[in-house]
Amino acid sequence: MTFSYKTMGTCSQLINITVEGYTIEEVKFMGGCAGNLKGIAALVKGMHIDDAIAKLSGITCGFKPTSCPDQLARALKAYKEQNNL
């Protein structure tokens, strides 16, 4: 299943995520620091949703209260809530 998440408080504007069961298959960030976000996407590919949430939740960027990794964790939490997982 592929879903989109509109980010808040980051340079990236949108995250498109493909999940199969509980496994992250693909992540694409729209906007933001391309190299860093491609790296994050590569690192979470094949990862269990809960593991990604645990590793990425609460990461901040400079003085911002969130970051692109944190927004990805929030997107995955929202996905779980919407799908009763």
Image: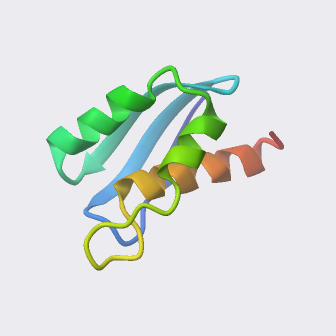
Location of residue 81 with respect to 64 vertically, above or below:
above
Location of residue 71 with respect to 60 vertically, above or below:
above
Tag count in the figure?
A: 0
* Quadrant placement of the N terminus: top right
> In which quadrant of the rendered view does residue 20 lie?
top right
Is 1 on the left-hand or right-hand side of 84? Answer: left
The residue most toward the front is 55
In the image shown, does 72 or 5 lie closer to the viewer? Answer: 72
Q: Position of residue 21 (x, y in %)?
A: 70, 23
Q: Residue at x 36, y 62 (%)?
A: 67
Q: Residue at x 53, y 51 (%)?
A: 73
Location of residue 39 with respect to 15 vertically, above or below:
above
In the image shown, does 74 or 61 lie closer to the viewer? Answer: 61
Colouring chosen for the image of the structure? rainbow
Is 22 on the left-hand or right-hand side of 6? Answer: right
Q: Residue at x 42, y 61 (%)?
A: 59
Q: Position of residue 14 (x, y in %)?
A: 38, 52
Is 51 on the left-hand or right-hand side of 43? Answer: right
In the image shown, does 6 or 77 lie closer to the viewer? Answer: 77
Q: Residue at x 27, y 42 (%)?
A: 37
Q: Position of residue 18 (x, y in %)?
A: 52, 29
The residue most toward the bottom is 63
Q: Position of residue 66 (x, y in %)?
A: 41, 68
> In which quadrant of the rendered view does residue 44 lie?
top left
Location of residue 43 with respect to 29 vertically, above or below:
above
* Quadrant placement of the C terminus: top right
